[in-house]
Image (cartoon, rainbow, N blue to C red):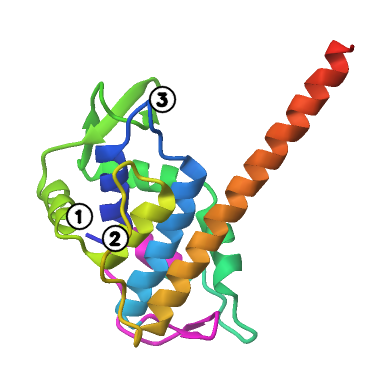
Amino acid sequence: MTTAKDLFIIALHLGSPDRPVGQGDLSLTLAGAELIDLVSAGAITLDGDRIVPDRGPAVDDRLLAEAAATLEGQAPYERVEDWLWRRGRDLAGAYQSALEEDGVLSQGRRGRFRSGADRVEPADTPARRQALERWEGGEPVLAALASAAGVPGGRQPQDGPSSEDEAVTTVLLTVGDAVMELEAVRQRRAIENAAFANVWRGP
């Protein structure tokens, strides 16, 4: 399992109708999780905030391999922020579909996310148990990503990634900035929609 899949399972496991995890927020953090796993796999390096593909070993996860295939292969390489927005579009839906195909998700009444008219929740599988074990162990990267996504119960890790791992730190900081930018866009649209409604209502 990858960090992105673990993150999706945790978001689904802890999410609720009262405290939903935003699909846009989750999609951005899933894209960040993919970058972190690609760094760990030796498939990319970061030159500042630029993503440089590396001829490391091929990754064996389908979605992670798909992410690697979307990277710009020539200089000037893509910035982390730009890639998060591009890759993150509807990424939560792609992960839901993949996990359903793998039998990791099942239909249920408590699940936060919908698949058509049905709700889904993590099935009792080794993948779910692994994700929960990683979460309950306070793994710093997973905890930081979950906090950025707004996962209920998410907490900032007591010990963040090592200061020596500049690539992971860069990705996490950029993910946090992207989620904040998305929230600012939501607030601006809400204000604009409210103003538009007031115009139609009149004095």
Q: Considering the numbered disc 1 on the image, is that residue within a helix, a strand or a loop?
A: helix
Q: Is residue 39 above or below residue 54?
A: above
Q: Name the residue under label 2.
A: 142
CA gap between label 3 and label 2 equals: 28 Å
Q: Can residue 91 be seen in this view?
A: no
Mark 1 or mark 2: name the one nearer the start of the chain: 1
For this orientation, the residue located farthest to the right is 203
The nearer-to-camera label among 3 and 2 is 2
Q: Is residue 55 above or below residue 144?
A: below
The amino acid type of the residue labelled 2 equals: Leu
Quadrant position of the N terminus in the picture? bottom left
Q: Position of residue 74 (x, y in %)?
A: 60, 85
Q: Quadrant of residue 29?
A: bottom left
Crowdedness near tag 1: few (<14), some (14–19) or many (≥20) residues, C-alpha within 10 Å:
some
Front in this rendered view, residue 60 or 17: 17
Contact (Cβ within 8 Å) of mark 1 with mark 2: yes
Q: Tell me residue 135's x, y (percent).
A: 20, 55
Segment colored magenta = 43-67
Depth check, mark 1 against mark 3: the one in front is: 1
Left or right, 61 with reference to 202: left
* Amino acid type at mark 3: Gly
Label 1 belongs to which residue? 135
Query: Left or right: 100 with respect to 93?
Result: left
Is label 2 in a helix, a strand or a loop? helix
Query: Percent x, y for residue 68?
Result: 43, 71
Disc 1 to disc 3, C-alpha distance: 28 Å
Amino acid type assigned to the residue bearing label 1 in the image? Trp
Q: Which residue is drawn at 66% across and 46% down?
A: 185
Q: Using the image, tell me which numbered label, if any, was put on residue 116.
A: 3
Q: How far apart are marks 1 and 2 (CA)?
A: 7 Å
